[in-house]
Image (cartoon, helix red, strand yellow):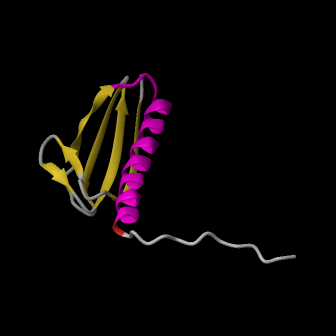
Amino acid sequence: MGWATWTTAAVPVGPDGVRTEEAGVLTGEVDVQTNWRSGQVRISVRPTGAAQWLTLGGASAFCPTGYRSRLLHEATVRALRADAADAADAADPGETPLPTRAAA
């Protein structure tokens, strides 16, 4: 069929981390890699800059096309970043004032 690989470096992870099948939970920043080959996708992570890739928990599955595996990769990266951003927002309980427009 075919194959495809995508990698995104230095993705922040929320305080609960990301669970891997081999090493348990990783925290901090991770690199994310999605590999698709002949209808199967596998998403792996590693601490940013590390050599060994670890399988993201539950992230080996059927995926019919390389295009859909790319969408899955992008969704995974967005979810990790959103979790980290939500945690950062929760850590800052102060309200951010809404911008105001000057009177015309």
Q: Is residue 10 visible?
A: no
Residue plotted at (46% across, 38% down): 70
- Residue farthest left in this picture: 23
Position in image of residue 13 (x %, y %): 31, 57
Q: Is residue 72 left or right of residue 43?
A: right
Specify the quadrant that holds the C terminus: bottom right
Residue plotted at (36% across, 53% down): 83
Determine if the magenta segment contains residue 81.
yes
Residue 91 lies, with reference to residue 41, above or below; the image says below
Q: Is residue 12 visible?
A: yes
Determine if the magenta segment contains residue 1.
no
Q: Which residues are magenta?
A: 62-90
Q: Is residue 21 left or right of residue 64?
A: left
Q: Quadrant of residue 101?
A: bottom right
Q: Is residue 57 left or right of residue 100?
A: left
Residue plotted at (43% across, 33% down): 69
Q: Nearer the viewer, residue 80 or 16?
A: 16
Residue 33 lies, with reference to residue 29, above or below; the image says above
Residue 51 lies, with reference to residue 6, above or below; the image says below
Residue plotted at (23% across, 54% down): 16
Specify the quadrant that holds the N terminus: top left
Position in image of residue 38 (x %, y %): 37, 24
Residue 34 lies, with reference to residue 84, above or below; the image says above
Q: Nearer the viewer, residue 69 or 12?
A: 12
Q: Magenta residues: mostly which secondary structure?
A: helix
